[in-house]
Each structure stands twice: as structure tokens, then as C-alpha cells.
Image: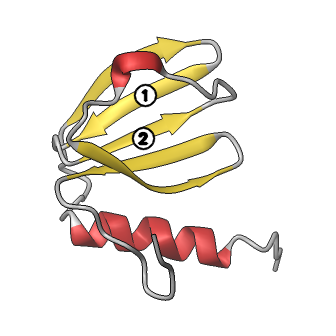
């Protein structure tokens, strides 16, 4: 078994998926598809950025807030700000 110390990140991503009811039948809308960034919205509730580009400009609407991020990825959720357990603003 490989352990790349990603348990906390994977747990956070799974929680976002569950909280927003994302499943295999969820609708995907591609917003950016460039060599250094891929941005998509899932069910108009969750936005995901994969790639080395840090700034995705105006691709993220103002009603989405950053929920989790890591090396070359970021996830935003639509709606009210949710602070993960054990974290503070």
C-alpha cells in the first residue's frame, strides 16, 4: 500500500462530494480547458481547478468560496461559507 500523506486531502474532497450530492450522474460544465488549467463546475454547486495555473481570473463566480486546495488543484463550493471542523477564519 502506498501512503503519500494524502488522507486528509482525500477525506476533505470526499466530504465535499457527499455534502453536495455529487455522483456518477452529476452534470459537468467545462469553464476553462487550457494546457495549464482545467476548470469545471459540477451540478452548478462545486467548481474544480486542476493544473499548474494559480490565477484563473474571473472564471470563479463571486457566490463560490474556496473550500480546499492543494498542489495544482483547488475546489470551491457555491453558497454560504463553510469552515471545516477544527479550522477558523
Whether residues under marks 2 and 1 lie with C-beta atoms below 8 angstroms apart, the answer is yes
Which of the pair 67/5 is nearer the observer?
67
Residue at image mark 1: 39
| Comes first in the chain, label 2 or label 1 | 1
> For the image shown, how many numbered marks are present on the structure?
2
Quadrant holding the C terminus: bottom left
Residue found at x 81% / y 80%: 1
Colour scheme: secondary structure
Give me the residue at 67% from left, 40% from top: 72
Which secondary structure lies at badge 2?
strand
| Residue under the point 17% across and 44% down | 43
Quarter-of-image position of residue 4: bottom right
Relative vertical location of residue 42 with respect to residue 29 in this rendering, above or below: below
Q: Which residue is mark 2?
A: 48
Report the Cα–Cα distance between label 2 and label 1: 6 Å
Residue 48: percent from left, percent from top: 42, 41
Q: Secondary structure at mark 1?
A: strand
Q: Quadrant of residue 8?
A: bottom right
> Looking at the picture, does residue 66 appear above or below residue 8?
above
Residue 18: % across, % down: 28, 72
Residue displayed at 16% across by 40% down: 44
Snapshot quadrant of residue 41? top left
Amino acid at each position: 500500500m502506498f501512503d503519500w500523506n494524502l488522507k486528509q486531502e482525500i477525506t476533505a474532497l470526499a466530504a465535499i462530494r457527499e455534502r453536495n450530492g455529487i455522483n456518477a450522474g452529476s452534470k459537468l460544465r467545462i469553464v476553462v480547458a487550457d494546457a495549464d488549467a482545467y476548470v469545471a463546475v459540477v451540478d452548478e454547486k462545486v467548481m474544480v481547478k486542476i493544473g499548474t495555473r494559480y490565477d484563473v481570473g474571473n472564471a470563479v463566480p463571486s457566490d463560490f468560496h474556496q473550500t480546499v486546495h492543494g498542489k495544482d488543484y483547488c475546489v470551491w463550493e457555491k453558497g454560504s461559507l463553510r469552515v471545516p471542523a477544527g479550522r477558523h477564519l
